[in-house]
Amino acid sequence: MFKLENTYLLESEIKLEEAQLILLQNTLIQNNLYLNTTDRSFIGKVNNISFSIIGTFFPIGVLCVFNGKFIQKDKLEIEITTSLHKAFRLMFKIWLLVLAGVILFFSISNFSFTLLAFSLIALIIGATLFRIILYFAYVLARNKTLHKLKSLLKVV
């Protein structure tokens, strides 16, 4: 539950060269994956046989990173791995540490077992809610970007 990494194996009707061209035409090429204003569908890097992109829809397109590679067989196969952007993984960990520090500081400074227990429950609930919100935003970003990618690359 709440897995922030997925793998897909897609088959396309088009040839490798056409898929690369379509992806290049619809991607704002940048080395770093951060949200930028553009009229294109994706932001990222596209190489001869691989790509690393994010969706451009504001504000959550940046949450999900698509790493893919093209495999030319009878039909073109596109192997894609999606994951939560590293910046958001780091942000969640920092947020959790700061929240834990603040709660524990106030619990220890006014030490009582009741306050400590309440603070730990609040920490668990706060972290869980934040993680759930992050998960659903990731799923929305993943699904929207995957749908756009499938339609552009004529996935069967």
Image (cartoon, rainbow, N blue to C red):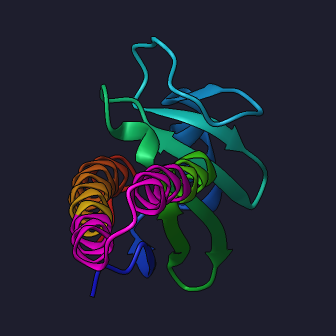
Q: Is residue 111 magenta?
A: yes
Residue drawn at 50 percent across, 25 percent down: 35
In this picture, residue 31 sits left or right of residue 51: right
Residue 133 is situated, as x and y percent measured from the top left of the image, at 22, 56
Q: Nearer the viewer, residue 103 or 151?
A: 103
Residue drawn at 47 percent across, 62 percent down: 108
Q: Quadrant of residue 122?
A: bottom left
Q: Is residue 73 magenta?
A: no
Please count the marks in the image.
0
- The secondary structure that most of the magenta stretch takes on is helix
On screen, 8 above or below 107? below
**Region of the chain picked out in magenta, as a range:** 96-125
Q: Nearer the viewer, residue 4 or 20?
A: 4
Residue 92 is situated, as x and y percent measured from the top left of the image, at 48, 55
In this picture, residue 30 sits left or right of residue 10: right
Residue 24 is situated, as x and y percent measured from the top left of the image, at 61, 34
Q: Nearer the viewer, residue 53 or 126?
A: 126
On screen, 21 above or below 124? above
Q: Nearer the viewer, residue 21 or 26?
A: 26
- Image quadrant containing the C terminus: bottom left
Residue drawn at 31 percent across, 28 percent down: 59
Residue 71 is situated, as x and y percent measured from the top left of the image, at 65, 76
On screen, 128 above or below 104? below
- Image quadrant containing the N terminus: bottom left
